[in-house]
Amino acid sequence: MKTIVPIDIITLGEDNSYHLLTSGSINGVNYFFLIDTGASHTIFDSTLVPQVDETDSIYKEIQSAGIQSGELKSSIGRIKKFKIGQLKLTEWTVVLIDLSHINSLYKKFTNKSIAGLLGGDFLLKHQAIIDYKKKKLVLRKT
């Protein structure tokens, strides 16, 4: 089964700086998500998503130039229901990180809060295809 999800292509005030934004829901609450093909892992904002059951706090060295360098405080959480298009995931274990610094940038240019980054793990698992011309993300349920 495949699902087609509309995407917005936005800029953050820079020429040739494009970001992919889509929407979905966590436990029935609608949020915006970045499609981040450069991120190896999907992460969610620990300050914006209170509906996630936090199971364990950890400190983990995450190799990232985009989020923050060095050691990040992260937590493992479980999302009871995640939906993007017709794709539904239940009891999904995710990484939670404070993304408030990213949200301050996106709010400045888009007036939208970002609940998370859909990274390579999610995109690969669901055989994602990004169609820039038609502004859509195609996902497959695996």
Image: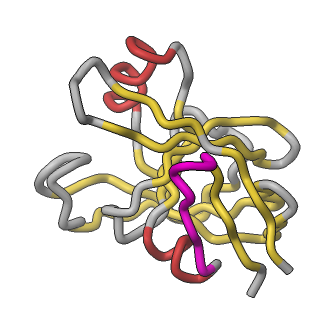
Looking at the image, residue 26 sits to the left or right of residue 38; the answer is: right
The residue lying toward the viewer, choosing from 131 and 110, is 131
Q: Main secondary structure of the magenta part?
A: loop
- Span colored in magenta: 127-135
Q: Position of residue 32 (x, y in %)?
A: 62, 36
Whether 122 is drawn above or below 31: the answer is below
Residue 104 in percent (x, y) is at 37, 19
In the rendered image, residue 65, in percent from the top left (x then y), is placed at 15, 53
Residue 8 included in the magenta stretch of the image: no
In this view of the protein, which residue sits in the foreground, 26 or 141? Answer: 141
Residue at left 33%, top 22%? 105
Which quadrant is home to the C terminus?
bottom right
Please indicate whether residue 57 sits to the left or right of residue 4 in the image: left
Identify whether 88 is placed above or below 10. below
Q: Is residue 138 left or right of residue 102?
A: right
Residue plotted at (32% across, 28% down): 101
* Res 90 quadrant in image: bottom right
> x, y (%) of residue 62?
24, 65
Most distant residue in the bottom direction: 142
